[in-house]
Amino acid sequence: MPQARDFPPVWERASVVLIPKRCRPAGTPSSYRPICLLDEIALGPLLWDIAYNNVLRTALLPGCNVVCYADDTLLLAGGGDWGEAREIANLTVACVVRAIKRMGLKVTPRKTEAIYFHDGFRGVPPQTHVTVDDIPVQLGTCMKYLGLWLD
């Protein structure tokens, strides 16, 4: 018989997810149901995939795409010129950020990176930014995604 506070090692590495209860104030602990998702059991990642699938299904403008791996999200948007590309990128970012927030998750603008991909025929991209959750994110010349440098 296990002693009090004696947990299997796998339980010590569980992820706790707080599910909000309906009609309860957000600031109190009793307003949430704590659910543990064990990392070694396929159900934890499976539930994440099912929930995050809503982000992948976000309605976007034609030619825009969302690519996700775990909680890393990559958005692809384009346009006929630099200005149009930036406007479409901002709309795409706003739609995806809204979908992520609807899940009760947060986006971290300071960890966000953005770059222009271009063929070089239209000259150097202008110095500009995209807006992530009301915070401007400067467009750079390269970025790291899943350990890969994109430029």
Image (cartoon, rainbow, N blue to C red):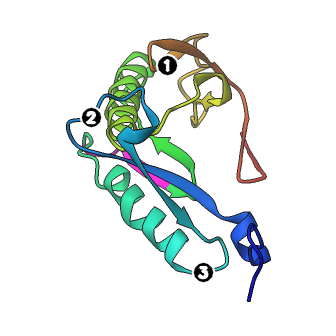
The kind of residue tagged 3 is Ile
The correct choice, above or below, for 128 with respect to 114 in the image is above
Q: At numbered mark 2, what does the secondary structure look like: helix, strand or loop?
A: loop
Quarter of the rendering containing residue 82: top left
Which residue is labeled 3 in the image?
41
Q: Nearer the viewer, mark 3 or mark 1?
A: 3
Residue 27 pos. (x, y %): 42, 26
Q: Determine which of the numbered discs, if any, sits on residue 130 in the image.
A: 1
The answer for how far apart the CA atoms under marks 1 and 2 are is 36 Å
Tell me where the magenta segment starts and ends, as one range. Answer: 62-67
The answer for how far apart the CA atoms under marks 3 and 1 are is 38 Å
The kind of residue tagged 1 is Val
Question: Can residue 108 be seen in this snapshot?
Answer: yes
Q: Determine which of the numbered discs, if any, sits on residue 24 in the image.
A: 2
> Which residue is at a point 73% across and 33% down the rendered structure image?
142
**63 part of magenta stretch:** yes
Residue 42 pos. (x, y %): 55, 80
Q: Determine which of the numbered discs, if any, sits on residue 146 in the image.
A: none
Quadrant holding the C terminus: top right
Residue 134 pos. (x, y %): 44, 13
